[in-house]
Amino acid sequence: MRSSLVLGLGLLLATHVAAKAELVVGAVIPLSGASATQGEDQRRGMEIALEEINAAGGVLGKPVKLIVEDSGGRVPSALDAAKKLVTVDSVSAVIGEYSSGITIPIGQYLVQSGKIHLNIGSSSNRIRDLGATSFSVLGLEAVSSKFAAKDVVAQGWKKIVIVGPNNAYGQGMASGVKEELEKLGATVMSTLLYTEGQTTYRRELQQAAQMKPDAFVYSAYGKDAALMNREAFELGINKTPWYAIYLSMCTADSQRETVVGQYGMDLNFVGPNGKAYEEAYRKKYGMSFKTSFSGYGYDALKLLAAAAGKAGSAEPAKLREALIELGKGYEGATGTITFDAGRQRSEQPYLTLKMGQNGYEPR
Amino acid sequence: MFDFILHVAIIAALNGLLALSLNLQLGYAGLANFGQIALFGAGAYGAALAFSWGFGPFAGLLLGLALVSLLALVFARLGRSLGADYWGIATLSIAEILRTVATNETWLTGGAQGIGGLPQLFGFDLPGTLALAAAALLATYLVLRGVTQSKFGLAVRLLREEPQLAASLGYDLAGLRRRVMLISGVPAGLCGFLYAHYVTFVGPDQLFASETFFIWAMVVIGGLANHSGAVLGAVALQILSASIPFAKDALGLTSEYVAAARLTLTGGGLLLFLLLRPQGLLPERIGSVRA
Amino acid sequence: MPEPVLSIRGLRKAFGAHVVLGGIDLDIAVGSIVGLLGPNGSGKSTLLDTVTGFVPKDAGRIELDGRAIESLDPGAISRRGLVRTFQLPRMPARMSVREVMLAAERSGSGLADALLGRRAPSALAVDGLLERLLLTPVAEQPASAISGGQKKLLSIAMALANRPRLLCLDEPTAGVHPNLRQEIMALLRDANAQGVTLVVVEHDMAFIRGLCPRCVVLDRGELIADCAPDDLADHPRVVEAYLGRAGARAARKAA
C-alpha cells in the first residue's frame, strides 16, 4: 500500500518536473513603429533558429516554445509585453529589444524577476549594468567602435565627419567612434546626427561636405540610409570616401550605383556557422540580410537551447550557469561568442569590406 | 497572472491621472492641448534629473512638480493671443521642442539613451505601488471634481462656451486659463514621477506626440467633461490594450496583428466616438453644479 | 455736471476707409438713464464696442469715474464697473440656465474658494431671481435652448449681478415679446434706483420714452442731437437722419 503511494507520488513528481522541463522563451521586439524593419529581421533570425532546433528534436525532449511580442517601439507596450511573458507565459528567458531606451527598462524588470535577459540589438554601454541575469549577444558600442576606428585610421584618413541617426543607437555609435578615433590620433571635425524620417537630407549632407573631411564615417538604416546615399551620390559628395558601420545594413535598401566604392565593416558571416546561416536566410526569405541584426536573434535562441540542453533544465538560475560556461567559446552565426566577466560579448569578429558592382566584397 | 493584473492596474491608474488632467483642460475648459505628453515628461524628467544629481525621490517629486508648473504656465501664456486652433498647434510644437531638447542635450538628460536606474518606491512591491497609484488617482479625482463642481468650475465652463460673455461679466480669461493649466499640470506631472520610479527609466522616446494621441482617445471615448468618464476611458483602454496579446495567442494569430489591433482600438475607437457618440461613454452632466 | 461716470472725448474708429465714428464727445452723468438712438449704420454698436473694450479704437479718450480705460481689455473694464449686454445674446449650450445665472456673479468664483470648499451665498438669491424673470420652468434646460427674448432677459439680469457702475445695453427689447418688455423696463428702473447708471441703445421709441429722460442721437458717426425724447420729433437733423432729406421735406409739408 505504502509503496504504491510512494510510487504514485514519485510519478506525480516526475511528471511535474517533466512538465517544467520545457524551454519557453519570450521575445520583445519592435514589429511596429520606427524600428519595425530591424525588429522583423530579429524575428527572422529567431524563427530560423527555432525551426532548426525543433527539427533536431527540440531541447529537454520537447520542442522549444518561442513567444514573440511586439514592443510597438514604446516603453509602456514593451513593459506590458515583458510582464505578460514573465507572469503569464512563465518564460525562462526573454530576448530583446532593439532600442536601448526600451532594452534597459525591460532588462531591469527581467533581472528583478530573476529571468534571463538576452540583449540582441542595443549597443549602449548602459546595458552592462543591467544585472546578474542579463547577457549581451551583441557587442556593445565599445567593441564595434574600436574595430571601425582602427580600420578607418588604417586607410590613412585623419579628418573625419561622423554621420548617424539622432536616436539611442546613433548617439551611442557616434560617441563611441569619436572616442576611439581620437585615441588613435584622428580628428573628428564634426558629428552630424540627423533627425530620422525626413524627405531630404541635402542640407545636412552639404553642411557635412563643407568641412572637407578625409572621409565620412556613417551608420544608417532603412529608407533614411537609401535616401542619404542617393542624395550624396547626386551631390557628388560620395567622391569623398564613405565608411559604413555595418555596411550591409547601411546599403540594404540603397541603389547599387549610389553606394559602389563605399568602405565598411560588418559582422563576419563568412565563417562555417555564418555561411550556413546566410544560406538558410536566403533560402527562407529569398534575399540577403535586410539588416545586420538577424544573426543575433538566431544566435540568442540557439545559445538558450544549448544552455538548456547543457543544464538539463529550463530554470533561469541553471540556464545562467550554463550560459556563462558556453560563453567561454560558442560558435555562433555571428562568429565566436565569448562573454566577459560582466556577461557582455567581449569579442566580435568583423569583416573589412568594400562595396563593388556585385555587392560587398572583403578587402 | 496575478502580477500581470497588478501591473495592468498600476498602468491604468497612472493613465487615469493623465486622462483626468487632459479632461479638465479639454472637457471643462475647452483647451485643446496637443502637447499633453510634455506635462507627463516634466514630471518624469524631474524625477530622473534629481536622481542623476544624487538626490532622493522626494526631491525628484518637488522638481517634477516645479517643472510641470513652469510648463503649464508657458502653455497658458501661449493662449493669451492665440485662437483655440492655433493654441493646439503651439502646444504640440512646444512638446516636440522639449522632446528634441531631451534627445540632444546629452550632458543634462542622457540624450537619446535617457536616464536609468531610478529606485522603485516600494522596493519591488507591486501591491504597494498599486496602492500609491490608486491613492493618487482617487485624490486627483476628488480634488478635480470639487474644483469643477464649484463657482470656479462654472467660470471655467463659461470660458469654454462663451468667452465674450465671460469677459463682459468681468472674468479674467487669461487668469482662468492659467489656473486650469496649473491645476491640471499637477496630476500629469505626478503621473510622470510615479511612472519614472515604476519603470526605473526615463527617455525621450516616451515623449512622442503619438502618446498624447492615446490620452486623447481615453478622454474622448470615456466622456469629455466627466471625471468618471476620463477614468473609465483610461482603465478600459488599458485593459483592452493589454488583452490584445492574449487574444492573439488564443486565436493563433501572429504578432503583426497586435500592432494593427492596438491602432484599431485607439485610433478607430477615437474616430468612431467622435463621429457617432462625441459625448463619450459617460456624457457631461449639464446642470450638475448647484453651488 | 459734477464728475460724470463716463466721459468720452474725440472717439474715432474707422474700418479701412469707412469712418464709423468721427470724433465723439459725450458725458454721462452719475445715476442717469440715457438713450442712444440713430438709424442703422450710424455707429451705435461700434460706440458701445469701443467704449467697453471689445473693439479697439483708433483715437480718443475714455474715462470711467475719472480713470482712463481706453487701453484695458474688456474683462478689466467690466471689473472696473462698466458692463455691457449684447444685441444677440449667445448663451452656453452645455450649461443650464440656472448654472449660467449662478456664474454671473463673480464673487466666490476663485480657485481658492473652490479648493477650500467655500460655497457662495448667492445660490438662494439665484432661484428667487429666476422666479422673478419667469425662467424657473426652464432653469434646468441648456441655456442656448431658451427663446431669444428669454436670453435677453437672462443676459440683462446677469449683467446686473455684479452691481455695475454703468450698464450699457445693446437693443434690450429687440426681438422680445411685448409682455417681457415691461419686465425689462421694471428691471432697469429698479437697477437705476439702486444707483446703476444706464445707457440704452434702442429703436423702440415707446420704450425710450418710458425709460430715458435724456437721449443722444448718432448719425453717420456724429452726435447730432442731445435732448429729451419728446423733443426729438421737432429736431430737424434727427428727422432728416431717419427719413432722409426728401422724407424730411415731406414730413415738414405734412406737419
Image: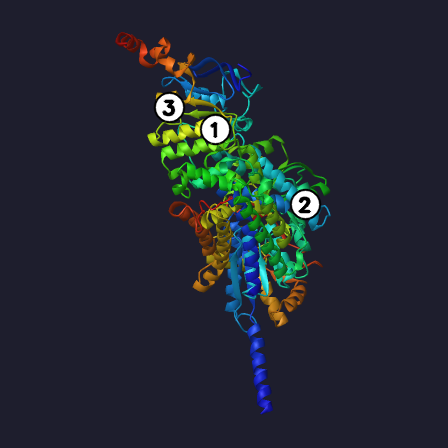
Q: Nearer the viewer, mark 2 or mark 1?
A: 1
Compared across the picture, whether C131 is left or right of A279 comes to left
Task: Give the spatial CA distance, label 3 vs label 2.
Answer: 62 Å
- Look at label 3 and name its amino acid: Phe
Figure check: B48 above or below A3: above
Compared across the picture, whether B284 is left or right of C3 comes to left
Figure check: A25 above or below C135: below
Disc 1 element: helix
Could you tell me which chain the residue with mark 2 belongs to? B
At x 41%, y 48%, the residue is: B273
- Look at label 1 and name its amino acid: Ala
* Residue A153, quarter of the rendered image: top right
Q: Nearer the viewer, residue B43 or C187?
A: C187
Q: Nearer the viewer, residue A302 or B9?
A: B9
Query: Which numbered marker is on residue C191?
Result: 1
Could you tell me which chain the residue with mark 1 belongs to? C
Q: Nearer the viewer, residue B78 or A67?
A: B78
How far across and down, in percent of the image, does residue A18 sit? 56, 76
How far across and down, in percent of the image, does residue B42 sit? 62, 43
At x 56%, y 85%, the residue is: A8
Q: Nearer the viewer, mark 3 or mark 2?
A: 3
Could you tell me which chain the residue with mark 3 belongs to? C
Density class for disc 2 (Cα within 10 Å; few <14, some 14-19, many ≥20) is some
Q: Looking at the image, is mark 1 or mark 3 earlier in the sequence?
A: 1
Tell me whether marks 3 and 2 sit on the same chain.
no
Residue underneath mark 2: B62
Residue underneath mark 3: C207
Task: Give the spatial CA distance, label 2 vs label 1.
Answer: 51 Å
Figure check: C226 above or below B209: above
